[in-house]
Amino acid sequence: MLVSIDSAIDSVIDDANAELRKLSLAIHNNPEESLKEEQACQTLVDYLERKGFKVERNVAGLSTAFVATYVSPSGAQGLNVGFCSEYDALPGIGHGCGHNLIAISGVALFLAIARVMEACWIPGTVKLFGTPAEEAFGGKITMLDQGTFDGTDLLMMLHPTAGYSGAWHSQCCLSLDVEYFGKASHAAMAPWDGINAGTAANIALLTMGALREQLKPDWRTHGIIAEGGRAANVIPDYAKIKYTIRTGWANELDILRERTLRVFEAAALATGCTHKVTEEFAYLDNLDNPVLGGLYEELMQSEYRVPPERGVGGSTDFGNLSHKFISLHGMYDLAGTRVPNHTIEFTRDARSEEAHERTLFAAKTAGRVAARCLVDQSFWSQVKKAHDERRQQTSGDREM
């Protein structure tokens, strides 16, 4: 009996609806921060193994990373398609970015394409990458560096937000720890004997605030004083800033980085402190594929019937993958409430039935896009051409 691709995708996701809902709520009800996602990882791995899939644990030296693999019964000579699940939570607000939903959307896509390969006798391999620590330091970057994604032809993931888009261009993001070292002294009896590390941190933040006047519209800088002293009557000998800088394009990040480092150095010189800068991680901008994104948006129209969002903002370690692999980072509307990510309200909506149903609709949509790549060589050629053109467009220096 012939099985249509669309019906295969719909049926497997519909059949798994209740199971996926249970997985989502289990992750949402037990929010775990980056690299501490033991229960979320175990919950997902246990589910996949019960379904009979092969799962590799502790991938790339990360205890909460995994890779599930399915090879078509007709052989592996077709495309190697991969999907990403995220499941880390934000400190203080839990799943305010909907990673419980990103987790199950990846599972739904993995199940759907495995079923398509089996039922429609399409050769190829499908993988689900369990990617921890997106909110903290970028687990995907570590996995990329360790070769976890090597051999993948197409990578996809879905992300809830306000509105939908197949062409979201994220910001590059570099996180820095800046430490100032001074000399402690009694603030009343002998302040002249001290070197105030807290003052250095304050000068650095004030100067970065002044620098914003000369930054490009899509650049962002923001940070906090994580440590600035423990007693008002003691000149602090140590202070620490946690700072983030963002740019619209990868080749602009070094320019803003150099300006920022000069500010941090100047604050040390002005106060007589020494300082140390530790660069934690760098997320690159997400390079969208207009062919994949165009089909995704076209199919999403059947539900939303409104124009897609074209906003820019936020960062993701998936952007690093998009610079190397053909990819789609599909955005979909969380629950129609228009609340922004990283808020308590978003955390609340991320457990709603409405958000769950929209997640499964987005997974069915992205599944159709992935399946089109598997069976339509002309479409796949257009996708590859668009990827090459996008990389060429962004490889040169942009005007400053």
Image (spheres, rainbow, N blue to C red):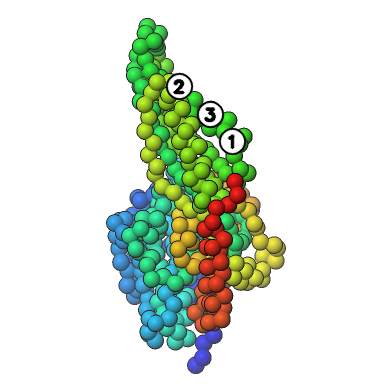
Residue 252 place in picture, x, y as percent: 53, 48
Residue plotted at (65% across, 58% down): 309
Q: Give, as a three-letter code, the residue at label 3.
A: Thr
Disc 2 vs disc 3: which is toward the camera?
2
> In this view of the protein, can residue 98 be seen by the observer?
no
Q: Is residue 112 left or right of residue 292?
A: left
Examine the rendered structure and indicate whether residue 33 appears above or below residue 153: above
Disc 2 vs disc 1: which is toward the camera?
2
Q: Which residue is mark 3?
A: 207
Residue density around tag 2, few if under 14, some if 14–19, many if 20 or more, within 10 Å:
few
Q: Give, as a three-letter code, the residue at label 1.
A: Arg
Marks 2 and 1 close (CB-CB < 8 Å):
no
Residue 89 place in picture, x, y as percent: 44, 50
Q: Which residue is mark 2?
A: 270
> In this view of the protein, can residue 56 be seen by the observer?
yes
Examine the rendered structure and indicate whether residue 203 appears above or below residue 108: above
Residue 114 sits in quarter = bottom left
Q: Which residue is mark 1?
A: 212
Marks 1 and 3 close (CB-CB < 8 Å):
no
Q: CA distance from mark 1 to mark 3?
A: 9 Å
